[in-house]
C-alpha cells in the first residue's frame, strides 16, 4: 500500500493517544494541552 502525503489544503487534525481528545488547531510540540500525551496527526494516512 503506497503512503500518501496530506494535501496542502487539509486542516490539521490531531488525536491524543492517551485521553482520545481531538484537536483541530496547529500544535508545535505534538503534546496534548489537557493531559500532555502524544498527539497523532490524523491527516496523514496510516
Image: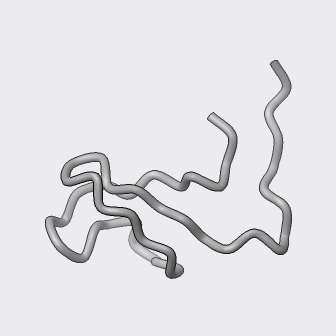
Name the quadrant of the N terminus.
Answer: top right
Residue for point 60% across, 71% down: 12
Q: What is the quadrant of residue 19 in the picture?
A: bottom left
Q: What is the quadrant of residue 39 in the picture?
A: bottom left
Q: Nearer the viewer, residue 19 or 3?
A: 19
Q: Please indicate whether residue 22 sits to the left or right of residue 33 in the image.
A: right
Q: What is the quadrant of residue 4 in the picture?
A: top right
Give how far across and how far down residue 10 sits, in percent: 75, 69
For residue 7, above or below residue 40: below
Name the quadrant of the C terminus.
Answer: top right
For residue 10, above or below residue 46: below
Give how far across and how far down residue 5 sits, in percent: 81, 49
Residue for point 31% across, 66% down: 31
Number of numbered discs present?
A: 0
Q: Please indicate whether residue 36 sits to the left or right of residue 30 in the image.
A: left
Give how far across and how far down residue 8 sits, in percent: 84, 70
Q: Please indicate whether residue 13 sits to the left or right of residue 31 in the image.
A: right
Residue at the limit of the structure toward the left, as seen here: 35
Give how far across and how far down residue 35 sits, in percent: 14, 66
Residue for point 50% across, 81% down: 25
Residue for point 30% across, 61% down: 21
Amino acid at each position: 500500500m503506497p503512503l500518501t502525503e496530506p494535501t496542502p489544503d487539509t486542516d490539521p487534525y490531531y488525536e491524543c493517544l492517551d485521553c482520545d481528545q481531538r484537536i483541530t488547531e496547529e500544535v508545535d510540540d505534538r503534546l496534548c494541552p489537557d493531559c500532555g500525551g502524544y498527539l497523532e496527526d490524523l491527516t496523514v494516512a496510516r
